[in-house]
């Protein structure tokens, strides 16, 4: 008679041969593919509709929001600068006569209303917002 460990090893081998082929071919391979496809679909849905963003996209959005906030904060300073100008009425009439928004922005930049202390050059975004605010106040009068 064979020793006990040999018989148990043979029994284990028979069980392994009986279970493993069916386990690998019928469950393991489709399970792995399902996990891979499911994770890819989760990423697609998350980035498309779920609001997920990469760090570079979040950084770009934060820069745009901060630029808009700075521009909004500096527009009242630009409007105060035009009040300090003695030729304000004449320049406002010239500004309202200009039809192109680009030329209106350039005009505000040339007047110096969009140039702030410590800066050599005027801020274009502030000049554009200031020009639109000046035109709104001129239309209201």
Image (cartoon, rainbow, N blue to C red):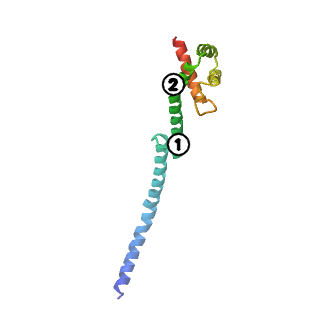
Residue depicted at x 52% and y 42%: 59
Q: Residues within 10 Å of mark 2 (few under 14, many from 20)?
A: some
Q: Position of residue 119 (x, y in %)?
A: 61, 33
Side of 123 relative to 23 (left or right): right
Question: Can you tell which mark lies on residue 18?
Answer: none
Residue depicted at x 64% and y 32%: 120
Mark 2 or mark 1: which is in front?
Answer: 2
Q: Residues within 10 Å of mark 1 (few under 14, many from 20)?
A: few
Q: Secondary structure at mark 1?
A: helix
Query: Which residue is the site of mark 1?
Result: 59
Q: CA distance from mark 2 to mark 1?
A: 27 Å
Query: Which residue is the site of mark 2?
Result: 76
Residue depicted at x 53% and y 38%: 63
Viewer-side residue, 15 vs 58: 58
Q: Position of residue 103 (x, y in %)?
A: 65, 21
Q: How many marks?
A: 2
**Does residue 115 lie above or below 88 as drawn?**
below
């Amino acid at each position: 008679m064979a020793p006990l460990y040999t018989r148990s090893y043979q029994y284990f081998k028979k069980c392994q041969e009986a279970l493993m082929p069916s386990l690998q071919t019928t469950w393991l391979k489709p399970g792995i593919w399902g996990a891979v496809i499911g994770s890819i679909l989760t990423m697609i849905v998350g980035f498309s509709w779920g609001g997920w963003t990469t760090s570079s996209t979040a950084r770009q959005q934060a820069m745009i929001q901060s630029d808009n906030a700075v521009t909004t904060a500096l527009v009242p300073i630009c409007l105060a600068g035009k009040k300090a100008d003695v030729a304000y009425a004449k320049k406002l009439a010239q500004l309202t006569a200009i039809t192109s928004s680009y030329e209106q922005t350039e005009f505000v930049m040339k007047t110096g209303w969009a140039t702030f202390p410590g800066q050599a050059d005027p801020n274009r975004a502030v000049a554009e917002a200031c020009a639109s605010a000046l035109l709104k106040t001129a239309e209201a009068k």
